[in-house]
Image: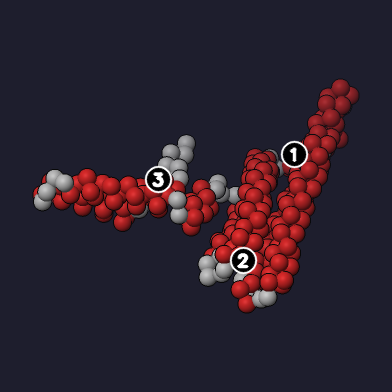
Amino acid sequence: MNTRLRMTPFTSALVNPLNILVIGSSVIAGLIAAWWLFPIGLIIWIIMVVVSSNDPALKLNTTIEERAPVAYRFQRSFSRIQKTEVKLFNSLSGVSNEIRSSLQPAREGLKETIEYIHRVSLDMSGIENQLSYLKSNTDYEVEIYRLKDKIAKSTDERLKAEYTENLLLVEKQVAKNDHTATLLDRYEAQLSTIASTLEGAVTDILRLKNLPNYKIREEIQQLCGIIESTQKELNEFKEESRKSINVR
């Protein structure tokens, strides 16, 4: 059972060392020096907590930290994808308000897409864990060999029919496992491609402040198009994999 405290921006602000130092100093000052220092310190602490909890950078870091981990094979690519969100956020510093405003739709679109990628990755992680469990608990090759041997040696037709039926079920499960493994390999490759595509697109955005306005608009539109296309491709893959697994 996971008992880890869920870290929201507000709770992160509460446990911020500087904010703890301020409230601690206020209590000590109120007890030792003058009582009126405590309410003043308390007001300063409340202001600091409110400001800290509304810090966009803190909100972004908290969101990233709170995302449930995906399967190990997907983690590296997904970490790269998350870093594109941080890079795009950091690119907003030092640019004009006009560029920042123009980039906001792209940033919101990227955030939404990463959340969607995370949900799909969690689904695929569940499939990966289920496949690993099946393979670790059953030696299908040994089971197929055992059933074939039983069929060959059996003289009772009813018993032979039962063994044959069991063999067909095991072979069907093996085929399903092989199909699922291929599906996971495809998703792993697609996730890596998505990571590279988003990294390249966001890196291009870093050049915005050195470009003329018309070029800036083109770059932002291109990034929005890439983000939209990424989510669409991923949605198509999810639907295809869902239908494929259900059919089999």
Using the rendered image of the protein, determine whether residue 80 is visible from the camera's viewpoint: no
- Amino acid beneath label 3: Thr
Mark 1 residue crowding within 10 angstroms, few (<14) / some (14–19) / many (20+) = some
Q: Which of marks 1 and 2 is in front?
A: 2
Q: Which residue lies at the image location 75% right of the left edge and 59% below the top edge?
A: 225
Task: Identify the residue position indicated by label 3 in the image.
Answer: 11
Using the rendered image of the protein, determine whether residue 217 is visible from the camera's viewpoint: yes
Task: Identify the residue position indicated by label 1 in the image.
Answer: 143
Task: Identify the residue position indicated by label 2 in the image.
Answer: 99
Q: Is residue 102 above or below residue 11?
A: below
Q: In this view, does 39 lie to the left or right of 237?
A: left
Viewer-closest of 164 and 75: 75
Q: Quadrant of residue 165?
A: top right
Q: Residue 67 carries which label?
A: none
Q: Which of marks 3 and 2 is in front?
A: 2
Q: In this view, does 83 lie above or below 211?
A: above
Q: In this view, does 110 lie to the left or right of 59?
A: right
Q: Earlier in the sequence, mark 3 or mark 1?
A: 3
